[in-house]
Each structure stands twice: as structure tokens, then as C-alpha cells.
Image (cartoon, rainbow, N blue to C red):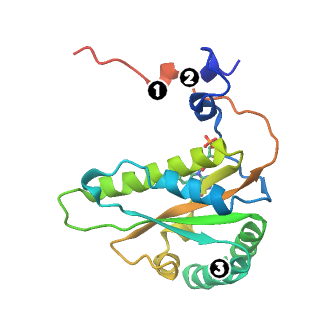
């Protein structure tokens, strides 16, 4: 039994859906679009945010823009790591081609603000999580990916994120291929009670 569902939770509830979410790297069409995509983006905009800085910035990459995006990243890879570039570029092109929809996640950081940068980044992460959950609730699947490209200033700049703002990763979104439900870690390892 999946331990996260050991207590009865009505299958129609949001909590049931929350407890059954898992990432999917094997995505196929259709991607969320129209009203579904708007709901996913709106869920991102429901993230907690200290000081109402609203650091969340989402850049949608889809359809005809995908090959051009792959080429922009290819240029960055070539400059970053010329020796390994051919294989890395091929791998990235293939990923972009097979990913139905990519949402680049940015955090517009206000430096030297009384709200520390870590809190602005955490808020961007919370937005990403809300979006993954919303996608799952609507029957889609997703995966948050970073890797060297997400930390390359040239890639961030191509999306309009200049320091101190940051690219915090990419959400790959689409329809998940059916697969097994992955076991989740035990609460015992992750939770303890402080008793002084
Ligand atoms: C900030 C962040 C960055 C990630 N980057 C990658 C990545 O570049 N490549 C990858 O395979 N998984 C990456 N992951 C992990 C997957 O998104 C996913 O969480 C993992 O496959 C476990 O699946 P689960 O969400 O069902 O537990 C990242 C996760 C986070 C939170």
C-alpha cells in the first residue's frame, strides 16, 4: 500500500490528488493550453510571498518557438563547454523536441531588500510546486528540471532574466505516459518532534 494514502482520503478530494502527484519525465501531447494552462499559471501566482514582492516570472516556450529555443541554448552550450557540446546539444534538442510544453521559471530578485533573496527564491519554488500540482489535478504531468543550462547566465539572459534575477529551472509539461506509482519516503526518516 502507498503509505501516503494509508488513511482513507476520498478519491475526489484535492488532498487525494496532492498525495498521488509524482513527476513524469515521459510526456506526450497534449500539453496544457488555453484555459487549462491559465489555471496552472494562476496556481503559480497563488504561491506564498513575503512582502508582496511577486517575484514569479513564467516564460512559455512551445510550438514553433521550440526549435529556435533549442538553438539559443545550443549557442550557450557551445560557449560553455565546446569539447562536449555536440553530444550535449543533440541531447538538449531531442529533449525540447519531445517536451510538449516548457515553462521557464524565473525569480525577479530585488537585491538588498529587507526580504532576503532566499525568501524570494523560495517563493519562486513554491510557485513551481503549485504549478506541478495544478497540472496533476487537471490530468497532466510535469517535471521540474534544471541542470547546467538553468545556471548559465547566457540562457537566463535569453529569457530576459539578468542578475540579480534568476532562472530557477524549467517545467516540462504534457500528458504523462501511464507508469507505476513510485514509493514515497517514510515519515519516520523525515519527521521528528522537538521536545526541548
Ligand atoms: C529544483 C529542482 C531541479 C531539478 N532538476 C532536475 C534535473 O535537471 N533533471 C532531473 O532528472 N530531475 C530534476 N529534478 C527532479 C525531478 O523534478 C523530480 O522531482 C524527480 O524526478 C523525483 O520525482 P517526484 O517529483 O515524483 O518525486 C529537479 C527537482 C527540483 C526540485
Q: Quadrant of residue 8?
A: top right
Q: Position of residue 60 (x, y in %)?
A: 59, 70
For label 3, count other residues whose C-alpha is less than 10 Å away and answer few (under 14), some (14-19) or many (20+): some
Tell me which numbered mark, 2 or 3, is placed earlier along the sequence.
3
Q: Position of residue 100 (x, y in %)?
A: 74, 64
Q: Report helix, strand or loop for mark 1.
A: helix
Q: Quadrant of residue 111?
A: bottom left
Q: Which residue is mark 2?
A: 186
For label 2, count other residues whose C-alpha is less than 10 Å away and answer few (under 14), some (14-19) or many (20+): few
Q: Residue at x 68, y 84 (%)?
A: 68
Please determine whether, in this image, residue 115 is positioned above or below residue 110.
Answer: above
Q: Which residue is mark 3?
A: 69
Of circles 2 and 3, which is in front? 3
Q: Position of residue 21 (x, y in %)?
A: 64, 38
Tell me which numbered mark, 3 or 1, is placed earlier along the sequence.
3
The CA distance from mark 2 to mark 3 is 40 Å
Locate the N terminus by quadrant: top right
Residue 153 appears left or right of 91: left
Q: Position of residue 142 (x, y in %)?
A: 66, 52
Using the image as rendered, state which of residue 25 and residue 58 is in the foreground: 58
Q: Tell me if label 2 and label 3 are in contact, CB under 8 Å.
A: no
Mark number displayed over residue 24: none
Residue 135 appears left or right of 126: right
Using the image as rendered, state which of residue 61 and residue 166 is in the foreground: 61
Q: Residue at x 45, y 55 (%)?
A: 45
The answer to whether mark 2 is within 8 Å of ligand 1 is: no
Locate the C terminus by quadrant: top left
Q: Residue at x 65, y 55 (%)?
A: 36
Of circles 3 and 1, which is in front? 3
Q: Residue at x 26, y 14 (%)?
A: 195
Q: Report helix, strand or loop for mark 2.
A: loop
Q: Which residue is mark 1?
A: 190
Amino acid at each position: 500500500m502507498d503509505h501516503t494514502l494509508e488513511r482513507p482520503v476520498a478519491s475526489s478530494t484535492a488532498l487525494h490528488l496532492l498525495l498521488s502527484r509524482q513527476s513524469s519525465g515521459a510526456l506526450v501531447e497534449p500539453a496544457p493550453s488555453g484555459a487549462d494552462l491559465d489555471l496552472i499559471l494562476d496556481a503559480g501566482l497563488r504561491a506564498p510571498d513575503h512582502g508582496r514582492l511577486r517575484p514569479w516570472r513564467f516564460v512559455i516556450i512551445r510550438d514553433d518557438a521550440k526549435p529556435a529555443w533549442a538553438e539559443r541554448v545550443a549557442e550557450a552550450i557551445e560557449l560553455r563547454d565546446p569539447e562536449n557540446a555536440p553530444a550535449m546539444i543533440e541531447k538538449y534538442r531531442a529533449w525540447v523536441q519531445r517536451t510538449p510544453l516548457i515553462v521557464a521559471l524565473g525569480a525577479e530578485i530585488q537585491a538588498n531588500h529587507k526580504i532576503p533573496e532566499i525568501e524570494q527564491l523560495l517563493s519562486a519554488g513554491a510557485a513551481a510546486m503549485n504549478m506541478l500540482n495544478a497540472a496533476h489535478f487537471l490530468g497532466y504531468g510535469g517535471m521540474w528540471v534544471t541542470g547546467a543550462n538553468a545556471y548559465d547566465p547566457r540562457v537566463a539572459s535569453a529569457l530576459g532574466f539578468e542578475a540579480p534575477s534568476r532562472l530557477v529551472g524549467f517545467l516540462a509539461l504534457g500528458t504523462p505516459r501511464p507508469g507505476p506509482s513510485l514509493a514515497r519516503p517514510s515519515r519516520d526518516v523525515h519527521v521528528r518532534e522537538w521536545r526541548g
